[in-house]
């Protein structure tokens, strides 16, 4: 454990308890306090197209969206929020409107006149973003902060006078040069970036604030939010601001839903979060049922039967990822534990159902049959069972016993916190078998992602099994996709794809699908697909290659953070991207394989 292990972000890691926060009013909607978790989304229409914007806002509100965000790139765009607001209200809809501000303080000042809340990204609001490497002296650092204060104070004063709320929303992909050079591209840098702005607001006695710490990597996102909560608690009880949760650039389809459930769901499970947005590269109206399902899908059993006394401190560091140390063992010819690959288990019944087409299933292969694994299933509250496991001389696969009255994440946390020996751990999505569940597929997917993904991001686990999905091939696909999304086992191309918004310079949905079709066989290659430059260059830090909107109909291609090809016509850009991947030695031709239905 690191020095951060003395910090605390959660009152009880083994029982649900929602974090207490002050209430912030956004329009007529309360966020935080005793309010339910609110669901948000963002429209994709051009902010200058009043009719289209009004129609999208109404569609989102009718779908159950409780707060709607609209981009305001410049003052001209922000001024049209007056007409959008009038159109929405004239239609009898009172959903709160939020202006999304990047780069332009004057746009924020205009937008605050017309909306209920302003979202400011401290990394690019009146700040430098040139990826310069330099040392800032304390005096130079203070000069930068004073420059920011001069730009930010007018907005704070206006929001205070008009009763507007504000979200201080840090994005991992858009930290300022000042923050990057002092704190690095880290969760700590994300937190400090937001705190700089909040201190200015507090100096003016403005508290109508909401925080967010968004990243495309669920591990980074989870660590950043946890660190934020710990730092807020350190500052004092009146720093109890509500929290907005989101995974940026989650992507589309199953992958986007899994990544969102890991990041958002694991934090909600620990009682963190007052409002959420699921950022899918799809029509925004599709985000609402997924967000609602994530909110409804939480384990909130705070009345678990009495736990042993030795459960107060985690044996892992919640603020800095490190895989739990374990011994290596071999099962069915596969090594697991230690630094070995995370393995995928299935049942004998499912294995037999797939045996005739394993050669057609590509990477979604079952590796170990659970009935042949020798796994020991125990109740983590049973001290005698724990002592018996600790006394075993040979490494043994351990898991939590099915059917006990504990939720999955607390049960596995308790197991590893009480075990003295380093036996490998088999994670489960549910402590019931598929025959005992009657969930729809989305619930199964979100539950598995939240439970297994959360534990993987804490470094817990060496193998996984999906018990809540009866379909054999589908349960394997979920297994591998969760491992991929959690960064535990990369078996296919990884995509960072932002959701559409009014800043987007090309059709993100069709372009992402086109890129995925052309490059989906490149194992371990990470490709970012960004509609504009707001988060693009920063998120390139996590990607090998980037496809970023540079101007209408024109694409810039990146290698890492560096733009290397500019103003490529959109109809040529995917081919040019493939050429760029080839230039850097990471292209292979796709395999010819007969598809199998899984």
Image (spheres, rainbow, N blue to C red):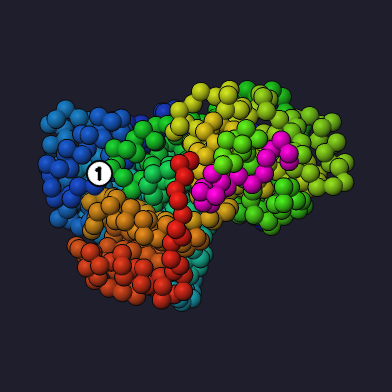
Residue lying at 58% horizontally and 22% vertically, measured from the top left: 436
Relative height, residue 54 to residue 198 (above, below): above
Task: Report how many numbered discs are placed on residues in the image.
Answer: 1
Q: Which range is magenta? A: 357-373
Relative height, residue 390 to residue 139 (above, below): above
Residue lying at 34% horizontally and 68% vertically, measured from the top left: 577
Quarter assignment of residue 370: top right
What residue is disc 1 on? 43
Question: Percent x, y for residue 191?
Answer: 48, 54
Q: Nearer the viewer, residue 34 or 370?
A: 370
Task: Say left or right for 48 vs 19.
Answer: left
Task: Say left or right for 40 vs 470.
Answer: left
Question: Percent x, y for residue 305?
Answer: 69, 23
Task: Say left or right for 532 vs 277.
Answer: left
**Magenta-colored stretch includes residue 398:** no
**Magenta-colored stretch includes residue 362:** yes
Residue lying at 23% horizontally and 42% vertically, measured from the top left: 115
Residue lying at 45% horizontally and 51% vertically, measured from the top left: 594
Relative height, residue 589 to residue 412 (above, below): below
């Amino acid at each position: 454990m690191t020095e951060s292990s003395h910090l605390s972000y959660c009152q009880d890691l083994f029982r649900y308890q929602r974090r207490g926060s002050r209430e912030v009013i956004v329009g007529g909607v309360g966020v935080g306090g005793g309010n339910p978790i609110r669901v948000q989304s963002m429209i994709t229409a051009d902010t200058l197209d009043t009719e289209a914007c009004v129609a999208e806002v109404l569609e989102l509100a009718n779908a159950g969206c409780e707060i709607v965000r609209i981009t305001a790139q410049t003052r001209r765009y922000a001024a049209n929020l007056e007409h959008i607001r009038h159109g929405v209200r004239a239609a009898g809809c009172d959903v709160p409107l939020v202006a999304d501000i990047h780069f332009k303080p004057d746009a924020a000042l205009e937008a605050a006149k017309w909306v209920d809340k302003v979202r400011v990204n401290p990394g690019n609001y009146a700040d430098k973003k040139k990826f310069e490497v330099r040392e800032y002296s304390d005096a130079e650092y203070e000069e930068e902060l004073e420059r920011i204060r001069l730009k930010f104070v007018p907005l704070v004063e206006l929001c205070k006078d008009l009763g507007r709320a504000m979200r201080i929303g840090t994005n991992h992909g858009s930290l300022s040069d000042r923050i990057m050079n002092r704190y690095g591209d880290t969760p700590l840098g994300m937190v400090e970036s937001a705190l700089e702005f909040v201190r200015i607001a507090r100096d003016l006695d403005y508290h109508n604030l909401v925080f967010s710490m968004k990243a495309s990597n669920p591990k980074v996102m989870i660590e950043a939010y946890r660190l934020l909560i710990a730092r807020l608690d350190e500052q004092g009880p009146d720093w109890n601001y509500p929290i907005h949760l989101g995974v940026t650039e989650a992507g589309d389809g199953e992958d986007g839903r899994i990544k969102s459930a890991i990041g958002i769901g694991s934090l909600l499970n620990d009682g963190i979060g007052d409002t959420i947005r699921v950022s899918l590269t799809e029509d925004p109206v599709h985000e609402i049922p997924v967000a609602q399902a994530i909110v409804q899908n939480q384990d909130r059993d705070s009345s678990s039967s009495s736990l042993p006394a030795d459960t107060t401190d985690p044996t892992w560091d919640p603020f800095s990822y490190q895989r739990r140390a374990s011994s290596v063992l071999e099962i069915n010819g596969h090594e697991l534990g230690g630094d070995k690959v995370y393995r995928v288990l299935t049942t004998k019944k499912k294995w037999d159902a797939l045996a005739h087409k394993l050669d057609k299933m590509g990477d979604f292969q079952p590796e170990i049959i659970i009935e042949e694994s020798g796994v020991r299933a125990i109740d983590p509250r049973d001290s005698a069972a724990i002592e018996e496991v600790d006394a075993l001389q040979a490494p043994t696969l351990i898991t939590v016993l099915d059917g006990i009255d504990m939720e999955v994440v607390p049960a596995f946390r308790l197991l590893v916190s009480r075990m003295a020996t380093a036996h490998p751990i088999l994670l489960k999505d549910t402590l019931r078998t598929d025959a005992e569940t009657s969930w729809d597929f989305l619930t199964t997917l979100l539950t598995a992602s939240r439970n297994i993904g959360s534990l993987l991001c804490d470094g817990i686990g060496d193998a996984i099994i999906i018990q809540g999905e009866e379909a054999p091939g589908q349960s394997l696909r979920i297994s591998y996709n969760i491992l991929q999304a959690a960064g535990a086992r990369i078996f296919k191309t990884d995509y960072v794809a932002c959701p559409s918004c009014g800043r987007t310079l090309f059709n993100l949905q069709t372009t992402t699908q086109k890129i995925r079709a052309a490059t989906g066989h490149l194992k371990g290659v990470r490709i970012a697909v960004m509609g504009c430059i707001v988060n693009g260059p920063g998120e390139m830090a996590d990607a090998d290659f980037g496809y970023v909107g540079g101007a209408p109909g024109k694409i810039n291609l990146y290698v890492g953070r560096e733009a290397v090809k500019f103003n490529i016509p959109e109809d040529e850009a995917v081919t040019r991207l493939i050429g760029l991947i080839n230039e850097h030695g990471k292209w292979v031709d796709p395999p010819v394989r007969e598809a199998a239905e899984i």
